Amino acid sequence: MVTLGPPEEPLLVPMEGTRGCPGAGPMGGTSGPPPPLTFPGTSPTRCPARPRPPAPEPASAGAAWGAAVGLTPPGRPPPGSASPPPPRAGPQRAVDGRGAAAAAMRLLFLAVLRRHTGNAVTAQRVRDHLEAAGHVCILKDAFDFESPSEISSFIKAENLEAAVALHLYRGGRLLQGNGIPFGIIFGGTDLNEDVNQGDKNKVMGKVLEEARFAVAFTESMKETAQRQWPHAKDKIYVQSQGIATVPNTAFNWNTFLQCSEINQSADNLHVFLLICGLRQVKGPLYLVDAFSEWHQEEANVYMVIVGPEVDPVFTREVKAKVKRSPGVRLIREMAQEDLHAVMKNCFALVNSSVSEGMSAAILEAMDLEVPVLARNIPGNAAVVKHEVTGLLFSDPQEFVQLAKRLVSDPALEKKIVANGKEYVRKYHSWQEERQTYRQLVRTLERSTED
Protein backbone atom coordinates (compact mmCIF):
# COMPACT_ATOMS: atom_id res chain seq x y z
CA MET A 1 0.00 0.00 0.00
CA VAL A 2 1.11 3.49 -0.75
CA THR A 3 0.01 6.67 0.96
CA LEU A 4 -3.24 5.62 2.51
CA GLY A 5 -6.42 7.62 2.45
CA PRO A 6 -9.75 6.22 3.56
CA PRO A 7 -9.60 2.47 2.81
CA GLU A 8 -11.43 1.26 -0.25
CA GLU A 9 -14.71 -0.41 0.55
CA PRO A 10 -14.10 -4.03 1.58
CA LEU A 11 -16.24 -6.69 0.02
CA LEU A 12 -18.38 -9.69 0.79
CA VAL A 13 -18.48 -12.44 -1.82
CA PRO A 14 -21.72 -14.34 -2.40
CA MET A 15 -21.48 -18.06 -3.00
CA GLU A 16 -23.84 -20.02 -5.21
CA GLY A 17 -27.28 -19.91 -3.67
CA THR A 18 -26.94 -16.33 -2.39
CA ARG A 19 -27.09 -14.50 -5.69
CA GLY A 20 -30.15 -12.54 -4.66
CA CYS A 21 -28.36 -11.02 -1.67
CA PRO A 22 -27.04 -7.48 -2.00
CA GLY A 23 -23.31 -8.09 -2.01
CA ALA A 24 -23.21 -10.35 1.04
CA GLY A 25 -22.57 -14.00 1.63
CA PRO A 26 -20.22 -16.65 2.93
CA MET A 27 -16.64 -16.42 1.73
CA GLY A 28 -16.00 -18.05 -1.64
CA GLY A 29 -13.80 -17.76 -4.69
CA THR A 30 -14.36 -15.27 -7.52
CA SER A 31 -12.61 -14.53 -10.76
CA GLY A 32 -12.80 -10.77 -10.38
CA PRO A 33 -13.64 -8.04 -7.88
CA PRO A 34 -17.02 -8.68 -6.22
CA PRO A 35 -19.62 -5.93 -6.05
CA PRO A 36 -19.44 -3.35 -3.27
CA LEU A 37 -21.04 -4.26 0.04
CA THR A 38 -24.46 -2.70 0.45
CA PHE A 39 -27.14 -3.49 2.99
CA PRO A 40 -30.26 -1.48 2.25
CA GLY A 41 -32.74 -1.41 5.08
CA THR A 42 -33.59 0.07 8.38
CA SER A 43 -31.80 0.65 11.64
CA PRO A 44 -30.57 -2.56 13.28
CA THR A 45 -32.68 -4.45 15.75
CA ARG A 46 -30.72 -6.45 18.33
CA CYS A 47 -31.06 -10.17 18.15
CA PRO A 48 -32.09 -11.69 20.38
CA ALA A 49 -33.86 -8.80 22.06
CA ARG A 50 -32.57 -8.17 25.55
CA PRO A 51 -32.65 -5.28 28.00
CA ARG A 52 -29.62 -3.04 28.21
CA PRO A 53 -28.60 -0.88 31.15
CA PRO A 54 -28.48 2.84 30.40
CA ALA A 55 -25.08 4.00 29.22
CA PRO A 56 -23.11 5.91 31.87
CA GLU A 57 -22.75 9.62 31.43
CA PRO A 58 -19.37 10.36 29.79
CA ALA A 59 -16.78 11.97 31.98
CA SER A 60 -14.75 14.92 30.81
CA ALA A 61 -11.34 14.15 29.38
CA GLY A 62 -8.60 13.96 31.98
CA ALA A 63 -5.92 16.58 32.22
CA ALA A 64 -2.60 16.07 30.44
CA TRP A 65 -0.61 13.65 32.54
CA GLY A 66 3.03 13.26 33.39
CA ALA A 67 6.21 15.21 33.69
CA ALA A 68 8.49 14.82 30.68
CA VAL A 69 6.68 16.78 28.00
CA GLY A 70 3.52 16.18 30.01
CA LEU A 71 3.96 12.39 30.04
CA THR A 72 4.96 9.85 32.65
CA PRO A 73 6.16 6.35 31.69
CA PRO A 74 4.22 3.59 33.45
CA GLY A 75 0.58 3.71 34.39
CA ARG A 76 -2.73 4.57 32.88
CA PRO A 77 -3.90 8.05 31.95
CA PRO A 78 -6.79 9.34 34.05
CA PRO A 79 -10.35 8.38 33.09
CA GLY A 80 -11.89 10.26 30.20
CA SER A 81 -14.67 10.11 27.68
CA ALA A 82 -14.66 7.52 24.91
CA SER A 83 -17.00 9.53 22.72
CA PRO A 84 -16.72 9.20 18.92
CA PRO A 85 -14.05 11.27 17.17
CA PRO A 86 -14.91 14.36 15.19
CA PRO A 87 -14.40 14.36 11.39
CA ARG A 88 -10.79 13.98 10.41
CA ALA A 89 -8.95 17.26 10.43
CA GLY A 90 -6.60 18.37 7.68
CA PRO A 91 -3.10 19.69 8.35
CA GLN A 92 -3.08 22.91 10.29
CA ARG A 93 -1.01 24.89 12.75
CA ALA A 94 -0.96 22.99 16.04
CA VAL A 95 -1.35 24.81 19.34
CA ASP A 96 -0.14 23.28 22.58
CA GLY A 97 -1.73 23.62 26.02
CA ARG A 98 0.16 26.86 26.77
CA GLY A 99 -1.23 28.53 23.67
CA ALA A 100 2.10 28.62 21.85
CA ALA A 101 2.05 27.49 18.23
CA ALA A 102 3.81 24.18 17.70
CA ALA A 103 5.58 23.58 14.41
CA ALA A 104 3.91 21.11 12.08
CA MET A 105 6.10 18.29 10.78
CA ARG A 106 6.08 15.93 7.84
CA LEU A 107 5.92 12.46 9.38
CA LEU A 108 6.33 8.95 8.02
CA PHE A 109 4.09 6.36 9.70
CA LEU A 110 5.07 2.73 8.98
CA ALA A 111 2.63 -0.05 9.83
CA VAL A 112 1.36 -3.38 8.55
CA LEU A 113 -1.74 -2.29 6.69
CA ARG A 114 -3.77 -5.36 5.86
CA ARG A 115 -7.24 -3.91 5.82
CA HIS A 116 -9.23 -4.05 9.03
CA THR A 117 -6.68 -5.99 11.01
CA GLY A 118 -5.88 -4.60 14.45
CA ASN A 119 -2.68 -2.88 13.38
CA ALA A 120 -4.33 -1.21 10.39
CA VAL A 121 -7.21 0.14 12.47
CA THR A 122 -4.81 1.40 15.14
CA ALA A 123 -2.60 3.02 12.50
CA GLN A 124 -5.54 4.88 10.97
CA ARG A 125 -6.64 6.15 14.37
CA VAL A 126 -3.16 7.32 15.43
CA ARG A 127 -2.66 9.01 12.06
CA ASP A 128 -5.89 10.92 12.63
CA HIS A 129 -4.56 12.05 16.02
CA LEU A 130 -1.33 13.33 14.49
CA GLU A 131 -3.00 15.09 11.58
CA ALA A 132 -5.47 16.74 13.94
CA ALA A 133 -2.41 18.21 15.69
CA GLY A 134 -1.37 19.83 12.42
CA HIS A 135 1.23 17.36 11.17
CA VAL A 136 1.34 15.88 7.69
CA CYS A 137 1.35 12.11 8.28
CA ILE A 138 2.14 9.78 5.37
CA LEU A 139 0.95 6.29 6.23
CA LYS A 140 2.82 3.50 4.44
CA ASP A 141 2.74 -0.29 4.55
CA ALA A 142 6.00 -1.66 5.98
CA PHE A 143 5.80 -4.51 3.46
CA ASP A 144 6.19 -1.99 0.62
CA PHE A 145 9.86 -1.59 1.58
CA GLU A 146 12.57 -4.23 1.66
CA SER A 147 15.39 -2.35 3.35
CA PRO A 148 16.32 0.80 5.32
CA SER A 149 17.95 2.18 2.16
CA GLU A 150 14.59 2.16 0.37
CA ILE A 151 13.08 4.01 3.31
CA SER A 152 15.99 6.48 3.24
CA SER A 153 15.29 7.29 -0.41
CA PHE A 154 11.60 7.74 0.32
CA ILE A 155 12.34 10.01 3.29
CA LYS A 156 14.53 12.25 1.13
CA ALA A 157 12.05 12.31 -1.76
CA GLU A 158 9.16 13.29 0.51
CA ASN A 159 11.22 15.68 2.66
CA LEU A 160 10.16 13.88 5.85
CA GLU A 161 11.37 15.09 9.24
CA ALA A 162 10.41 12.30 11.66
CA ALA A 163 8.75 8.90 11.76
CA VAL A 164 6.59 6.53 13.81
CA ALA A 165 6.46 2.75 13.35
CA LEU A 166 3.71 0.41 14.53
CA HIS A 167 5.42 -2.97 15.21
CA LEU A 168 8.94 -2.96 16.59
CA TYR A 169 10.36 -5.47 14.13
CA ARG A 170 8.42 -5.11 10.90
CA GLY A 171 8.34 -1.33 10.95
CA GLY A 172 11.08 -0.29 13.34
CA ARG A 173 13.96 -2.14 11.67
CA LEU A 174 13.39 -0.13 8.49
CA LEU A 175 13.97 3.17 10.32
CA GLN A 176 17.43 2.30 11.65
CA GLY A 177 20.25 4.58 10.58
CA ASN A 178 18.10 6.98 8.57
CA GLY A 179 19.06 10.03 10.59
CA ILE A 180 15.56 11.20 11.49
CA PRO A 181 14.05 10.90 14.98
CA PHE A 182 11.42 8.22 15.35
CA GLY A 183 9.16 6.53 17.87
CA ILE A 184 7.75 2.99 18.13
CA ILE A 185 4.35 1.53 18.98
CA PHE A 186 4.49 -2.14 19.98
CA GLY A 187 2.11 -4.22 17.89
CA GLY A 188 1.64 -7.45 19.83
CA THR A 189 3.31 -10.13 17.71
CA ASP A 190 6.63 -8.30 18.11
CA LEU A 191 6.52 -8.87 21.89
CA ASN A 192 4.63 -12.18 21.84
CA GLU A 193 6.25 -13.98 18.90
CA ASP A 194 9.26 -12.21 17.35
CA VAL A 195 10.93 -11.68 20.73
CA ASN A 196 11.53 -15.44 20.94
CA GLN A 197 13.63 -15.47 17.76
CA GLY A 198 17.24 -14.57 18.51
CA ASP A 199 18.05 -12.57 15.38
CA LYS A 200 14.82 -10.58 15.53
CA ASN A 201 15.30 -9.95 19.25
CA LYS A 202 18.72 -8.38 18.62
CA VAL A 203 17.41 -6.22 15.80
CA MET A 204 14.54 -4.97 17.96
CA GLY A 205 16.96 -4.11 20.77
CA LYS A 206 19.00 -2.02 18.35
CA VAL A 207 15.87 -0.28 17.11
CA LEU A 208 14.96 0.68 20.68
CA GLU A 209 18.44 2.17 21.17
CA GLU A 210 17.67 4.67 18.41
CA ALA A 211 13.97 5.22 19.14
CA ARG A 212 13.01 8.34 21.12
CA PHE A 213 9.96 6.63 22.64
CA ALA A 214 8.04 3.34 22.60
CA VAL A 215 4.36 2.85 23.40
CA ALA A 216 2.91 -0.30 24.99
CA PHE A 217 -0.84 -0.85 25.19
CA THR A 218 -0.69 -2.54 28.61
CA GLU A 219 1.52 -2.73 31.69
CA SER A 220 2.25 -6.40 30.92
CA MET A 221 3.52 -5.46 27.45
CA LYS A 222 5.72 -2.79 29.01
CA GLU A 223 7.12 -5.28 31.53
CA THR A 224 7.86 -7.80 28.75
CA ALA A 225 9.76 -5.16 26.77
CA GLN A 226 11.71 -4.00 29.82
CA ARG A 227 12.80 -7.55 30.64
CA GLN A 228 14.07 -8.08 27.12
CA TRP A 229 15.70 -4.67 26.64
CA PRO A 230 16.49 -3.06 30.02
CA HIS A 231 18.34 -0.24 28.30
CA ALA A 232 15.02 1.05 26.92
CA LYS A 233 13.01 1.10 30.16
CA ASP A 234 13.00 4.90 30.41
CA LYS A 235 11.58 5.21 26.89
CA ILE A 236 8.55 2.95 27.27
CA TYR A 237 5.16 4.52 27.94
CA VAL A 238 1.81 2.85 28.55
CA GLN A 239 -1.17 4.09 26.57
CA SER A 240 -4.27 1.94 26.18
CA GLN A 241 -5.96 1.96 22.81
CA GLY A 242 -8.65 4.59 22.46
CA ILE A 243 -11.98 3.27 21.29
CA ALA A 244 -14.75 4.89 19.28
CA THR A 245 -17.50 2.91 17.54
CA VAL A 246 -19.87 4.20 14.85
CA PRO A 247 -22.21 1.44 13.60
CA ASN A 248 -23.92 1.91 10.24
CA THR A 249 -27.50 2.87 11.15
CA ALA A 250 -28.79 1.71 7.73
CA PHE A 251 -27.50 -1.81 8.26
CA ASN A 252 -30.13 -4.56 7.94
CA TRP A 253 -29.46 -7.50 10.23
CA ASN A 254 -32.09 -9.80 8.69
CA THR A 255 -30.61 -9.29 5.23
CA PHE A 256 -27.16 -10.08 6.58
CA LEU A 257 -28.42 -13.32 8.13
CA GLN A 258 -30.12 -14.40 4.91
CA CYS A 259 -27.02 -13.70 2.87
CA SER A 260 -24.92 -15.61 5.40
CA GLU A 261 -27.21 -18.61 4.87
CA ILE A 262 -28.51 -18.49 8.43
CA ASN A 263 -32.15 -19.37 7.99
CA GLN A 264 -33.38 -18.83 11.52
CA SER A 265 -35.78 -16.38 13.09
CA ALA A 266 -33.79 -13.45 14.44
CA ASP A 267 -35.88 -13.52 17.62
CA ASN A 268 -34.55 -16.92 18.63
CA LEU A 269 -31.00 -16.73 17.34
CA HIS A 270 -27.64 -16.52 19.10
CA VAL A 271 -24.79 -15.44 16.81
CA PHE A 272 -21.26 -15.61 18.22
CA LEU A 273 -18.97 -13.33 16.20
CA LEU A 274 -15.24 -13.95 15.73
CA ILE A 275 -13.37 -11.07 14.04
CA CYS A 276 -9.82 -11.86 12.95
CA GLY A 277 -7.42 -11.96 10.06
CA LEU A 278 -7.13 -15.49 8.71
CA ARG A 279 -3.74 -16.51 10.07
CA GLN A 280 -2.59 -19.12 12.56
CA VAL A 281 -1.85 -16.75 15.45
CA LYS A 282 -5.51 -15.64 15.54
CA GLY A 283 -6.76 -19.20 16.02
CA PRO A 284 -9.89 -18.99 13.83
CA LEU A 285 -10.26 -22.80 13.82
CA TYR A 286 -9.71 -23.26 17.56
CA LEU A 287 -13.43 -23.43 18.43
CA VAL A 288 -14.91 -24.73 15.19
CA ASP A 289 -15.31 -28.42 16.10
CA ALA A 290 -16.71 -27.76 19.57
CA PHE A 291 -19.06 -25.08 18.30
CA SER A 292 -20.30 -27.24 15.43
CA GLU A 293 -21.13 -30.03 17.89
CA TRP A 294 -23.09 -27.55 20.01
CA HIS A 295 -24.96 -26.29 16.93
CA GLN A 296 -26.05 -29.83 16.13
CA GLU A 297 -27.58 -30.00 19.63
CA GLU A 298 -29.08 -26.50 19.48
CA ALA A 299 -29.79 -25.31 15.95
CA ASN A 300 -30.22 -21.65 16.91
CA VAL A 301 -26.56 -21.05 17.78
CA TYR A 302 -24.11 -19.98 15.06
CA MET A 303 -20.52 -18.82 14.92
CA VAL A 304 -19.68 -16.29 12.21
CA ILE A 305 -16.01 -15.64 11.41
CA VAL A 306 -15.29 -12.30 9.72
CA GLY A 307 -11.89 -11.23 8.50
CA PRO A 308 -9.41 -10.64 5.68
CA GLU A 309 -7.45 -13.39 3.95
CA VAL A 310 -4.04 -12.66 5.44
CA ASP A 311 -2.36 -16.04 4.87
CA PRO A 312 -3.52 -17.55 1.54
CA VAL A 313 -2.48 -21.12 2.37
CA PHE A 314 -4.09 -21.05 5.80
CA THR A 315 -7.18 -19.35 4.35
CA ARG A 316 -7.78 -22.37 2.11
CA GLU A 317 -7.59 -24.60 5.18
CA VAL A 318 -10.07 -22.39 7.04
CA LYS A 319 -12.52 -22.36 4.12
CA ALA A 320 -12.40 -26.14 3.77
CA LYS A 321 -12.92 -26.67 7.49
CA VAL A 322 -15.82 -24.23 7.74
CA LYS A 323 -17.51 -25.71 4.68
CA ARG A 324 -17.86 -29.06 6.40
CA SER A 325 -18.75 -27.63 9.86
CA PRO A 326 -22.49 -27.12 10.52
CA GLY A 327 -23.32 -23.91 12.35
CA VAL A 328 -20.14 -22.08 11.33
CA ARG A 329 -19.98 -19.37 8.66
CA LEU A 330 -17.05 -17.51 7.10
CA ILE A 331 -17.53 -13.95 5.83
CA ARG A 332 -15.09 -11.67 4.07
CA GLU A 333 -13.87 -8.50 5.73
CA MET A 334 -16.33 -5.62 5.88
CA ALA A 335 -16.27 -1.85 6.05
CA GLN A 336 -15.68 -0.76 9.64
CA GLU A 337 -19.11 0.83 10.17
CA ASP A 338 -20.83 -2.30 8.83
CA LEU A 339 -18.65 -4.50 11.00
CA HIS A 340 -19.65 -2.47 14.05
CA ALA A 341 -23.30 -2.92 13.06
CA VAL A 342 -22.83 -6.70 12.83
CA MET A 343 -21.11 -6.64 16.21
CA LYS A 344 -23.96 -4.64 17.73
CA ASN A 345 -26.48 -7.20 16.50
CA CYS A 346 -24.64 -10.37 17.46
CA PHE A 347 -25.18 -12.15 20.77
CA ALA A 348 -21.51 -12.17 21.81
CA LEU A 349 -18.02 -11.35 20.53
CA VAL A 350 -15.46 -14.17 20.60
CA ASN A 351 -11.66 -13.99 20.62
CA SER A 352 -9.69 -17.25 20.26
CA SER A 353 -6.21 -15.87 19.48
CA VAL A 354 -3.02 -17.67 20.40
CA SER A 355 -1.54 -14.27 21.32
CA GLU A 356 -2.74 -10.66 21.36
CA GLY A 357 -1.32 -7.25 22.10
CA MET A 358 -4.63 -5.58 22.83
CA SER A 359 -7.69 -6.65 20.83
CA ALA A 360 -9.55 -3.63 19.47
CA ALA A 361 -12.49 -5.91 18.62
CA ILE A 362 -12.90 -6.87 22.29
CA LEU A 363 -12.91 -3.23 23.35
CA GLU A 364 -15.29 -2.25 20.56
CA ALA A 365 -17.70 -4.98 21.63
CA MET A 366 -17.62 -3.68 25.20
CA ASP A 367 -18.29 -0.16 23.93
CA LEU A 368 -21.25 -1.48 21.90
CA GLU A 369 -22.60 -3.32 24.98
CA VAL A 370 -21.99 -6.78 23.59
CA PRO A 371 -20.70 -9.55 25.91
CA VAL A 372 -17.20 -10.90 25.30
CA LEU A 373 -15.86 -14.45 25.52
CA ALA A 374 -12.09 -14.46 25.14
CA ARG A 375 -9.35 -17.06 25.23
CA ASN A 376 -7.40 -16.80 28.48
CA ILE A 377 -4.10 -15.41 27.22
CA PRO A 378 -2.16 -12.45 28.72
CA GLY A 379 -3.25 -9.87 26.13
CA ASN A 380 -6.93 -10.72 26.61
CA ALA A 381 -6.74 -11.13 30.39
CA ALA A 382 -5.33 -7.60 30.58
CA VAL A 383 -8.71 -6.19 29.52
CA VAL A 384 -11.20 -8.99 30.29
CA LYS A 385 -11.73 -9.77 33.96
CA HIS A 386 -13.54 -13.09 34.24
CA GLU A 387 -17.22 -12.71 35.14
CA VAL A 388 -16.74 -8.94 35.52
CA THR A 389 -16.08 -7.42 32.09
CA GLY A 390 -16.36 -10.68 30.14
CA LEU A 391 -15.72 -14.41 30.27
CA LEU A 392 -12.34 -16.13 29.82
CA PHE A 393 -11.98 -19.71 28.56
CA SER A 394 -8.95 -21.99 28.45
CA ASP A 395 -10.12 -24.64 25.98
CA PRO A 396 -12.97 -25.21 23.49
CA GLN A 397 -15.01 -27.27 25.95
CA GLU A 398 -14.89 -24.49 28.55
CA PHE A 399 -15.90 -22.01 25.86
CA VAL A 400 -19.06 -24.01 25.12
CA GLN A 401 -19.86 -24.30 28.82
CA LEU A 402 -19.50 -20.55 29.33
CA ALA A 403 -21.40 -19.72 26.14
CA LYS A 404 -24.31 -21.91 27.27
CA ARG A 405 -24.24 -20.23 30.67
CA LEU A 406 -24.32 -16.79 29.04
CA VAL A 407 -27.31 -17.78 26.91
CA SER A 408 -29.25 -19.02 29.93
CA ASP A 409 -28.27 -16.35 32.47
CA PRO A 410 -29.53 -12.86 31.51
CA ALA A 411 -28.37 -11.43 34.84
CA LEU A 412 -24.76 -12.45 34.13
CA GLU A 413 -25.00 -11.00 30.65
CA LYS A 414 -26.40 -7.72 31.95
CA LYS A 415 -23.63 -7.44 34.56
CA ILE A 416 -20.67 -8.03 32.25
CA VAL A 417 -22.14 -5.76 29.56
CA ALA A 418 -22.54 -2.86 32.02
CA ASN A 419 -19.06 -3.39 33.49
CA GLY A 420 -17.47 -3.68 30.05
CA LYS A 421 -19.04 -0.43 28.89
CA GLU A 422 -17.86 1.39 32.00
CA TYR A 423 -14.34 -0.07 31.70
CA VAL A 424 -13.95 1.19 28.13
CA ARG A 425 -15.32 4.60 29.10
CA LYS A 426 -12.80 4.96 31.91
CA TYR A 427 -9.65 3.42 30.52
CA HIS A 428 -9.84 3.52 26.73
CA SER A 429 -10.60 7.16 26.12
CA TRP A 430 -10.16 8.27 22.55
CA GLN A 431 -9.39 11.82 23.74
CA GLU A 432 -6.68 10.68 26.15
CA GLU A 433 -5.03 8.61 23.44
CA ARG A 434 -4.97 11.65 21.17
CA GLN A 435 -3.37 13.78 23.87
CA THR A 436 -0.68 11.18 24.53
CA TYR A 437 0.42 10.86 20.90
CA ARG A 438 0.43 14.61 20.43
CA GLN A 439 2.75 14.94 23.43
CA LEU A 440 5.03 12.11 22.35
CA VAL A 441 5.41 13.46 18.82
CA ARG A 442 6.51 16.77 20.30
CA THR A 443 9.63 14.97 21.51
CA LEU A 444 10.42 14.20 17.86
CA GLU A 445 9.72 17.81 16.97
CA ARG A 446 12.22 19.04 19.52
CA SER A 447 14.77 16.58 18.17
CA THR A 448 14.51 18.07 14.68
CA GLU A 449 15.26 21.50 16.13
CA ASP A 450 18.36 20.40 18.12
Image (cartoon, rainbow, N blue to C red):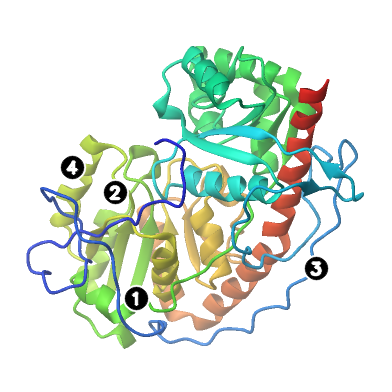
Q: Residue 105 bears which disc, if any?
A: none
Tell whether 439 sits left or right of 168.
right
Determine which residue is flagged by label 1: 270
Residue 339, position as x, y percentages in the image: 40, 64
**Mark 3–mark 1 contact, CB under 8 Å?**
no
**Category of crowding for the residue at label 3, using alpha-carbon neighbours closer than 10 angstroms: few (below 14), some (14–19), many (at least 20):** few
| Mark closest to the chain's N terminus, 2 or 3 | 3
Quick check: 249 above or below 25?
Answer: below
Quick check: 156 above or below 88?
Answer: above
Question: Which element carries disc 2, helix, strand or loop?
Answer: loop
Determine which residue is flagged by label 3: 60
Whole-number angstrom distance, CA of label 1 to CA of label 4: 27 Å
**Mark 2–mark 3 contact, CB under 8 Å?**
no
Mark in the foreground, 2 or 4: 4
Q: Residue furthest left?
A: 16
Question: Which element carries disc 1, helix, strand or loop?
Answer: strand
